[in-house]
Image (tube, rainbow, N blue to C red):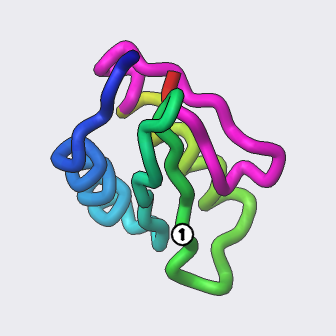
Amino acid sequence: MKIVSIAEILECNQIIKEKGLAFRIHLRDACGRQSCFIESLASDNGEEEHKALYKILDEYFSRFRFQLEYGEDRMNFWIL
């Protein structure tokens, strides 16, 4: 099983912050596969901000050869 470290989550959150997006990623667990959730830090995050966030997440985690599987609400994802 592939494991994402806390340091990688912190680095990802720093990249998101530097891009000016009001989101934070939280790591949940590694039971079977790791899961994360996206916290919106602003009430006015629109569709464009979400698209930019998903692009950052996909690019960031692909550097480590991880794939992301998003939940129906796209606020939860699993690391494959």
Is 55 left or right of 63, judged from the image as shown?
right
The number of numbered badges drawn on the structure is 1
Is 63 left or right of 78, judged from the image as shown?
left
Q: Nearer the viewer, residue 78 or 62?
A: 78
Q: Amino acid at mark 1?
A: Glu
The stretch drawn in magenta includes residue 76: yes
Q: Nearer the viewer, residue 10 or 33?
A: 33
Task: Name the residue tied to disc 1.
Answer: 39
Crowd rating for badge 1 (residues with CA inside 10 Å; few <14, some 14–19, many 20+): few
Which residue is most to the bottom? 43
- The residue at the point 71 percent across, 68 percent down is 46
Q: Secondary structure at mark 1?
A: strand
- The residue at the point 57 percent across, 36 percent down is 78
- The residue at the point 53 percent across, 38 percent down is 55
The stretch drawn in magenta includes residue 30: no
Is 41 left or right of 15, judged from the image as shown?
right
**Picture quarter with the N terminus:** top left
- The residue at the point 41 percent across, 53 percent down is 27
Position of residue 43 measured from the top left corner of the image (x, y, whole percent): 65, 85
Position of residue 5 measured from the top left corner of the image (x, y, whole percent): 23, 39
Which residue is most to the right? 72
Numbered range of the magenta stretch: 61-78
Locate residue 59: give its quadrant.
top left
Position of residue 47 measured from the top left corner of the image (x, y, whole percent): 74, 60
